[in-house]
Each structure stands twice: as structure tokens, then as C-alpha cells.
Image (cartoon, rainbow, N blue to C red):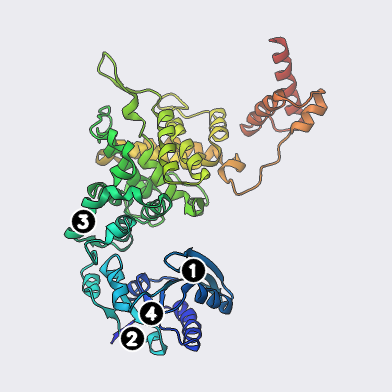
Amino acid sequence: MEMIALTSENRSILGPLEGLLAADNVEAYLVGGFVRDALLGRETKDIDLAVKADAHMLARKLADALGASFVSLDTERDVARIVGAIDGDEFVIDVARLDGDAKSDMARRDFTINAMAVPLHKSSLTRSEILDHHGARKDLRERTIRAVQEDVFRRDPVRMMRAVRLSAVLGFEIDADTRDLIRQSSTSIVSSSPERVREELLATLAARGARDSIRLMDDLGLLSVLIPEIDASRGVTQPKAHHYYDVFNHLVEAVGFVEVLLDSEPNGGIVHEMMPKFDGMTEYFSSYATDMHSRLTLLKLTGLLHDIGKPATKSIEQSGRVRFFEHSTVGEEMAKVVLRRMRFGRSGVSMTGAMIRHHLRPRQMAARNEMPTNRAIHRYFRDVGNVALDTLYLNMADFLAAKGPDLTRDDMARGSKVISHILKVGQNIEHVTNPRRSQPRVLLDGNDIMREFGLSPGPKIGDVLSVVGEAEATGKVNTIEEAVRLATQYLESEDGGA
């Protein structure tokens, strides 16, 4: 017998669940990640249940009894999901049909640490015999991810990505034999559902240590299969200002610096200490961006792709200077191809594309050692819109990845100065620095302009609004009278030049 550590949230759902199953005399087991996390003392609200019954029919009945929602996950394999809450504690229960006995079910699972089962009955709320036929508890103690069988990846190639995710989330090592199996099977990942691959990739990037996870994916041969476009960046040298001359390593390091910049837990380094901040930053980057993942996770992915257009645009001048003309626009289109292939939502594709297209702009808005003007900053927020803040930190990560371990406190001060200034000026542009708020009141709107100047709807109205809006945002006009006067001057100059 072995103790199972259960949180109060687990107990609040397992009690009613056990009672409902017992009433129907259903043989049921807690399996997979739930048992693993309970033994590790990790909090989880996801319950995996294997039942000797029709899983869909039983899940519907349980959902009704618990006042929860029912979702069908896989009709062929008979897997369904229940989503609900008890006393404010949310839960997700995945119910799968148990083919054969528990021992044969565990033999079909991916990794030993997921191949355990606990019979669900009264005593299981405090302790129960853990069914472990593959050395799972030993691998948990040794913090090892080991394949249950040699054919685990042939049966489901997405499990290769899951190994990387579990390594990132749990901080475990993938054992040598399992690594070899992944390398031998890596090309088969393309036969998997793009949506499932995308989810595993995003979940991996969401965990701390995303840079190391990317390098692990690369070592296992998965990165080149998922993003073959990135291979062209290997060995492509950059100007000497870059510590990592090779574009590929620059991309990987950018992922790490995005994480260091925005990690909610201080790490004591100068990057976290001196990084530019704004009010509500943690909440902003924790908010959803695409496919139910955060802005921070998407920004890490964008860091990996931000210079993907460099190899195709590299040129060397007679002086020996290396240039990458238009690499941002080329990279934008390449990144969109990558994301669409993995079935990213339109929002994610658009946001990533915009960040890559504008990632150089924050440091190009003014001459060297000068600060951007208020007018340039207004135009930046206007043009970049929904990802203006995100792009500032992508720009900062790009800068830091170029410096690498050569970064000094003076470098960090110079690098953050421009971003801090843009953020300070941008505080007055409320609708773009905080997109969750409504648009601010403007001195003149389109109806005012048409009424004041007798104009009909058309592009000229937008032109006037842009001129007046920019002047208002930068403090050049502060009253309706001043706005009307500026609009008059603009229209007269346009008519005079016609």
C-alpha cells in the first residue's frame, strides 16, 4: 500500500465521483498523469479515468449528475471529457474505455511514469494499492522519462513531442534509449494531427526553460521536421556585433531572453532587474492570445521565428558588410506559412506576423543615441496596434540575444532606455497600451468632420482623423477648437496642392 497525496480540490470531486460509479457498479481506475502528479505532490485538477464501460454513455451520465458539461474527444477510441466545478473548484475528467484489464491498458501507455493505475473505491481517497508493472515509481524517484514499449511512437508520433513537454514541465530527463527511439522516429511526426502537434509545442513553450526545450527538440530531430524552414539559418553568419554569429543560435537564444524579460519570478540577473516595465504587465502577458495560450507563450514562439527570413535575404557588400534587406517582411510571410501548417488560429498567425514585420522598428524610430519623438511613438502604436507592447519586448529580446553573454550593465541600460521611453510616452495612448479598455474619447470623430466641413464619406475623412488623432495623442491639440483649426489647415493645404 502506498499513500496518495490528494488536495482538497481532488477530494471534493473524487468523493462524489466514487459514489456515482459505485452505485452503477462500474470498475474504474485513476490512471496516467493524475496518479503521477499525486505521487509527485503536484497540484492538478485534471483527472484521468479508465472504466470498464461505454465511456461516452457513462461520461454523459456523470456530467448530468455532477451538473457539468460533456465533450466527446474521440469516438473511435471511446474517450470523452467532463468539465465542471464543485464548490467553486474546477475540474476536468477524461473518461476512457478500459479494453482488457488494467495491466494491458498500462502496457499501451506512452511512458512508465504515466503507466500506473489506482482502483477507485472508498479507501483510494486516502491510500490504495498502486498498480505499477513498468517501474514507474522508480523512474519517478530518478526523475526519468522512459518509453513503456519500443513501438510507443509508431502507435502515436505525438508522444515524441509529449516527451519534450513532460521534460520541461516536470524537470525530468529523457532516458538514452527513449531519446534514440525518438531520433529514429522523428520524421513520422508529420503524420500526426497538426492541431495536436501545435498544442504540445505551445504547452512546451509555456513552461519555464523554453530555450532548453527548443534545443532538446533540435537534438532529437523534431525541430527540423516541424519547422524545416529554420534549417537554412544554421551556419549563417551575422555581423560581429552579434555574439551568436550563427542565425540559428540567435533565434534560440531570443526565446530564452523573452522568458527572462517577462518571467514573473525575479531571477536576480541584470536583465530582469533592469527590464522596462508597465502597469499590469504580468496580467497582460498572461492573457490569452491564440488557441487558448498566452501572449507570453506566443511571444516565445515569435522569438524563435523572428529572423527566419535572414538566410533568404543575406547579402555582402564590397566592404564586407553583411546586410539582410527586407528580412522582416520576408520572415513575416515565412512564419505565417509555418503557423498555418500547424493550424494556428487566425489571431495567432496575424499577431506573430505583425511582431516579426515590426520587430526592428522600436530602435529605428530615432537616430543613434537619440529618443524617438512623440509623433513617431504615436505612429508606432497606431501601426502595430494589438501587438505594439509585445513587439517592444521582442525587440528587447532580439537586442539581448545579439549581445549574449557579452551583455554588460551599460549595454542593458542603453538597450532598455529606448523601450522605457516608448512605454512612458505610450501611457497616454490608452487604447493601444491597454487594449482591454475601450477606445478613448477623441476631440473630433468622422461625423464631426463631415458636419463641420460639408464632406461626404470617403478616404479624406480618414486622413483628417489620422492627422488630428496624432496631434491629440502627442499633445499638440487639446481642445475641439484647436482640432478644428488643424483640420482646416490640413484640408486647405490638401486642396491647394491638388
Q: What residue type is labelled 2?
A: Ser
Residue picked out by circle 1: 81
Q: Earlier in the sequence, mark 4 or mark 1?
A: 4
- Give the residue at x 29% y 75%: 104
Q: For marks 2 and 1, give the one nearer the viewer.
A: 1
Q: Earlier in the sequence, mark 3 or mark 1?
A: 1
Say left or right for 462 vs 335: right
How packed mark 3 is, by other alpha carbons closer than 10 Å (few <14, some 14-19, many 20 or more), is some
Query: Badge 4 is on which residue?
Result: 29
Q: Under tag 2, what secondary structure?
A: strand
Total labels: the figure holds 4
Gap in Å between the C-alphas at discs 4 and 3?
29 Å
Cα distance, mark 3 to mark 1? Answer: 31 Å
Residues under labels 4 and 2: Cα distance? 11 Å
Q: Which of marks 4 and 2 is in front?
A: 4
Give the answer, above or below, for where 8 lies relative to 289.
below
Q: In this view, does 427 lie above or below 487?
A: below
Q: What residue type is labelled 4?
A: Tyr
For marks 2 and 3, give the CA distance: 34 Å
- Secondary structure beneath dot 1 equals strand
Q: How far apart are marks 2 and 1 (CA)?
A: 25 Å
Q: Disc number at residue 328?
A: none
The answer to which of marks 4 and 3 sits earlier in the sequence is 4
Secondary element under disc 4, as helix, strand or loop, is: strand
Front position in the image: 50 or 309: 50
- Judging by the rendered image, the residue that carries numbered circle 3 is 181
- Amino acid type, label 1: Arg
The reply to whether residue 410 is in sight is no
Left or right of 422? Residue 467 is right
Instruction: Give the CA separation, mark 4 to mark 1.
Output: 15 Å
Q: What residue is shown with label 2?
A: 128
